[in-house]
Image: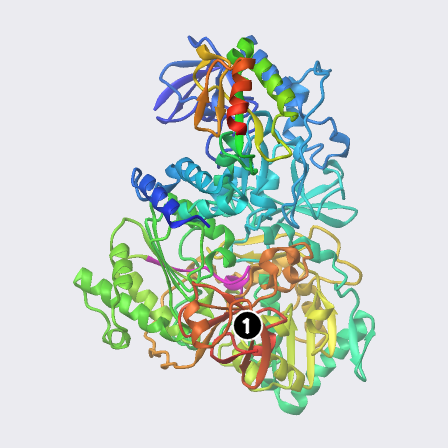
Amino acid sequence: MLSTESFKKIDQELEKYPVDQKQSAVMAALRIAQQEKDWLSDETIEAVANYLGMPPIAVFEVASFYNMYDLQAPGRYKLTVCTNLPCALSGGAVAGKYLKQKLGIEYNQTTADGQFTLKEGECMGACGDAPVMLVNNHRMCCKMTEAQIDQLLVELGK
Amino acid sequence: MLEIEIDGKKVKVPDGGTVMDAANKAGTYIPHFCYHKKLSIAASCRMCLVEVEKVPKPLPACATPVTNGMKVFTHSEKSVKAQKGVMEFLLINHPLDCPICDQGGECQLQDLAVGYGGSASRYAEEKRVVVNKNLGPLISTDMTRCIHCTRCVRFGQEIAGIMELGVANRGERSEIMTFVDRTVDSELSGNAIDLCPVGALTSKPFRFSARTWEMSRRRSISPHDSLGSNLVVQIKHDRVKRVLPLENESLNECWLSDKDRFSYEALNSEDRLTRPMVKQGGQWIETDWQTALEYAAKALKGVIGEHGAAAIGALVSPHTTLEEQYLSQVLIRGLGSDNVDFRLRQSDFSADETRVGIPSLGMPVAEINELDRVLVIGSFLRKDHPLLAQRLRQAAKRGCQINLIGHSADDQLMKLQANLAVAPSLLVGELAALAVAIAEQKNLAVDASIAALASEVSAEIKAVATSLISGESRAVFIGNAVVQHPAFASVWFIAQTIADLTEARLGFFGEAAGSVGGYAAKAIPQTGLNAAAMLQSSLKAYLLVGVEPALDFADSVAAKAALEKAETVVALTAFRSAVDAVADVMLPIAPFAETSGTFVNCEGSAQSFHAVVKPQGETRPAWKVLRVLGNILELDGFAFESSEAVRDEALSGGLASALSNRIGSVTLAKGRTNNGVERIADVPIYFADPLVRRASSLQKTRDARAPGMRVNASMIQRLGLEAGGRARVSANGVMAELNVELDAGVPDNCVRIAAGHPQTQALGPMFGNLAVERI
């Protein structure tokens, strides 16, 4: 179950919608749940579903559709590299490959020490700054050349 | 109305119609997968792309609204090219396993691939593989074949009322699944099999047992609930292989409940009685028909000679056909007795004195969808009447306010205005209060005898009253639990008063396929004993027609005792275990698939059907057995050549004119004040009749799990129980041990223990007080 604090936050989101349209808050509720729990387990998804009065599978549809929701526990830092076409053409694919090599893992894997998880992301709306990456969904990193990546990894590794 | 031209043909469609609607009206076929007339529009398969004049790109016909003067070309070069393109994409990830696929031969994808697919694939890369899911005992999956039309998902959301399947993940990783490998438990789940346009969802009981083109198709009528769903029974080598819906827009539409669909498995059960048997010295001995019938006739005659004709009686299952019910009563009356009844789970028969006619739905089934305000009294709606509940669900979506007053506030998977649970002893008082509240709000007078019974008008009852006096088209429906209620006549009378006050139509849902037919066939006593009285007065001989005494009666203990005490019990039965404990002679009769007959459904439509397969072994249709028995007993009125002749005679008085839900004055019985623990008994959906009890796949579903004792939280505390623990329940000195289940929908002072199940059979009456203690 989620903490009362999280439920309070979900309540704030619910206020934005009509009383009989609670499902409108499902994305916000999942985001809040993920912030608390780091990832969305089946139990967490069901808790959100029950709270919003939705069938659990309907919440699971949403949670599995959007790739910023984690259905498995990520490492301490989740690095999401945009590999959509504009980024891929402007160095995104290379950045991804470099990260794989540096961390010794493939996409959707976590390093043995539990520090880093590598993910492929969808367009982050900053194609001009390609290649772009996200750290833990909230920190955006632009123009990630190999040197920049090295620097980021050192910084996060501390 | 909008005018549209489809391939040069002009059609008019109402505003808001789609190109697909217009094409259907014009008789033009547009290929499609995800479109279904009963479901919302997804436009996810793209198969129905058509060319529209002045539109540069082809548009999906199912999701394109018609505009005036629109010109559509469904077979133009551009349309066909688009459709072929879509087909090529659909086939990219679809396995080429038609030879081992159950859908082969009745597959929309296969059929359309012949028309729109290439003769060879250009796709040489690896195909996608999707792990199969376990959806329970009824639906088998081959998810690699899925084309993501989402019909099954929309069916759950819109028709079954519960979204059990969903599309997880995204894009090329999309998969149809349930949440964390749960099973699909809806009582309508089998329809997803029909809806699946490919072989992704197929029938588990039917799996790999026949090909569609090897089977012959015959029409039949469902013998289970009172709707009388129309069936297509598919047969191979004189065995029923599968049951599918026969579309009948006025009854079952294109749906079937799982009970109607999968109960055929019982037809081939090991338990079928296939030879006549007589009991000699406590041993069952197989014999021939002549010997068995003469034995039965001699036994009945012997009892009459010794104790008089009033010492015999017939108990007829409400799931038997009109013909069987009719001949049973002709036989009993021919022998000089008037003891015949089919209302086995009824306990109050005083309504017989003043009821005007045969109780029925009081309106065509199809009109349920049009109602604005509904009151349903005493029904476990979804489990008692899966498809009537489905119609109410559609009505609720239209804005119909549905008010339920029953013994348990179960989730009916539809929007309800009220869902009140009252203890059986309080039902009369609460309904009287509702009548008073309605009269008050409408400034009308209410019968003083009703007002005297009324309990205090609560806010909830007031709200129900307010709901019922508004709207255009209203109905009050009486469910099975009321018919079984010890104060049935009083509840009927008050329900009639409520219907009169609100100018609503009054109707009965009806318990079984033969619930209206039994009245029409006069299989009820005129002067003799009713079902309950027959058991109480311990007759010397009983004729049982299709009855399973341990599970079919209002009081299973009384039934067992009476039958054990009787000198002779002649049982016409399809299943050996149903009667072998109490009978003296067992005559094997044919279940619905093996006999011709008629079921009169809840709205009063007599639907006749033919046998679809030969009777198994030496089984004979029950109407023939009764005819021969009548002849052996040298009774008049048994010169029938066919079941149609029996039907015509049974219905010779006219059926429609005999239907009436009116009841004259009733001495109202207030439920006695009850300080003990009251029993609430539902009849579980898969234990309602002898056939479904032996349908092996249905018996593996969640709905068929052993019943526990359901109680609310405050009762758990009061009785000192523990949810999940065990409790000892006793009634009339008999005990049963049951699991305690928490159920907030059960009212105070009550425990809900299902009837019709071997585990609770010892507890006897469906209503009354119980003692409960913790183990």
Instruction: Choose top left, top right, bottom left or bottom right for residue B292.
Output: bottom right
Task: Please identify the residue farthest to the front as the structure is shown.
Answer: A158
Residue nearest the observer in this picture, B768 or B288: B768
Q: Is residue B432 visible?
A: yes
- Whether residue B750 appears in this view of the structure is no
Q: What's the image's color scheme?
A: rainbow
**Would you say A141 lies left or right of B100 here?**
left
Classify B37 as above or below B400.
above
Provide residue B675's location: percent of width, then percent of height: 39, 81
Instruction: Return the residue nearer the eye: B171 or A6.
Output: A6
In terms of image quadrants, where is residue B277?
A: bottom right
Q: Residue at x 75, y 64 (%)?
A: B271
Query: Which residue is labeled 1 in the image?
Result: B344
From this viewpoint, which residue is outermost toward the bottom?
A: B306
Element marked by disc 1: loop
Residue sitting at x 80%, y 60%: B617
| Amino acid type for the residue under numbered disc 1 | Leu
Q: Position of residue B291 (x, y in %)?
A: 81, 75
Q: How many numbered discs sit on the rendered protein?
A: 1
- Chain under callout 1: B
The front one of B558 and B6 is: B558
Q: Which residues are magenta?
A: B505-518
Residue B400: percent from left, percent from top: 34, 48
Q: Residues within 10 Å of mark 1 (few under 14, many from 20)?
A: many
The reply, left or right, for residue B422 in relation to residue A112 is: left
Q: Residue furthest left?
A: B443
A85 w.r.t. B424: above or below: above
Q: Quadrant of the C terminus of chain B?
A: bottom right
Q: Residue at x 37, y 37 (%)?
A: A24
x, y (%) of residue B696?
A: 69, 57
Q: Quadrant of the N terminus of chain B?
A: top left
